[in-house]
Amino acid sequence: MTTTLRALGLALLTALPLIAAAPARANMPAPTTMPVADGIHALTVAPEARAGYERAKFKHWIDADKDGCNTRAEVLIEEAVTAPSVGPGCKITGGAWRSYYDDTTVTAASGLDIDHMVPLAEAWDSGASDWTPARREAYANDLTSPRSLVAVTAKSNRSKSDQDPAEWMPPAADAQCHYLSDWVSTKLRWRLAADPTELAALEQDAADCDDTRVTYDPAP
């Protein structure tokens, strides 16, 4: 099940030294980890270009492993803090989730959106306009990295819309360093650029995030 891959990604984030040293995984490259400030400086800086963007150019939500649950459902199942029931047709009932953007507990899956950490329009502006349709589909359904997609309240997701950190940050104060890490990790993973205004905002916000790390695997 795709959730297994997503769980592996979470394990990599929390058990990096152990995995990197394990002989059985000698052929598996370790994720790249660095202070968030170094991650920001590793970003390519380039102007954005929105011309030609259409949301439909990023096909989602798909059922990549054909287990009956699409990408949205896979994220909901994996990120639940109280496991929901999964019925026929991958119908999700019960469960509970913590929306870290606004520090809110949600007890109905219908109250959640699955946010692309770097919004599809922002990805397009930052380099995805040059990708193949298959790569854009992979980006829009990226279950391998636990940072790419996140279940959050519909209210917070729609407040964010397609804005970058120069324009929007999570309202929960304790979420901001976490968010910066996720944003920069996702951009590095997919080799997406940052525009100068975005970069300046990232650098300013990261000043209070000395203990925050960026961890990512390059996307296939």
Image: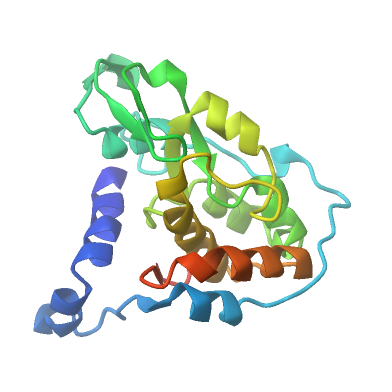
* Viewer-closest of 207 and 202: 207
Q: Could you say which is closer to the camera, residue 96 or residue 64?
A: 96
Tell me which residue sits at (53%, 67%) in the image: 206
Q: 98 or 64, which lies in front?
A: 98
At horizontal 61% and vertical 71% (from top left) the residue drawn is 203
Looking at the image, the residue that sits furthest to the right is 51
Residue 189 seen in the current view: no
Q: How is the image coloured?
A: rainbow
99 vs 40: above or below: above
Total marks placed: 0
Would you place residue 153 above or below residue 176 in this image?
above
Which residue shows up at 53% across the image and 49% down it?
A: 117
Q: Which residue is drawn at 67% across and 77% down?
A: 44
The answer to which image quadrant residue 205 occupies is: bottom right
Residue 21: x percent and y percent? 14, 84
Residue 65 visible in this rendered orientation of the protein? yes
- Percent x, y of residue 76: 35, 32
Report the side of 4 relative to 211 (left or right).
left
| In this picture, residue 3 sits left or right of residue 182 | left
Residue 188 position, x and y percent, is: 54, 71
Q: In which quarter of the image is the N terminus?
A: top left
Compare residues 40 and 127 and report the one nearer the observer. 40
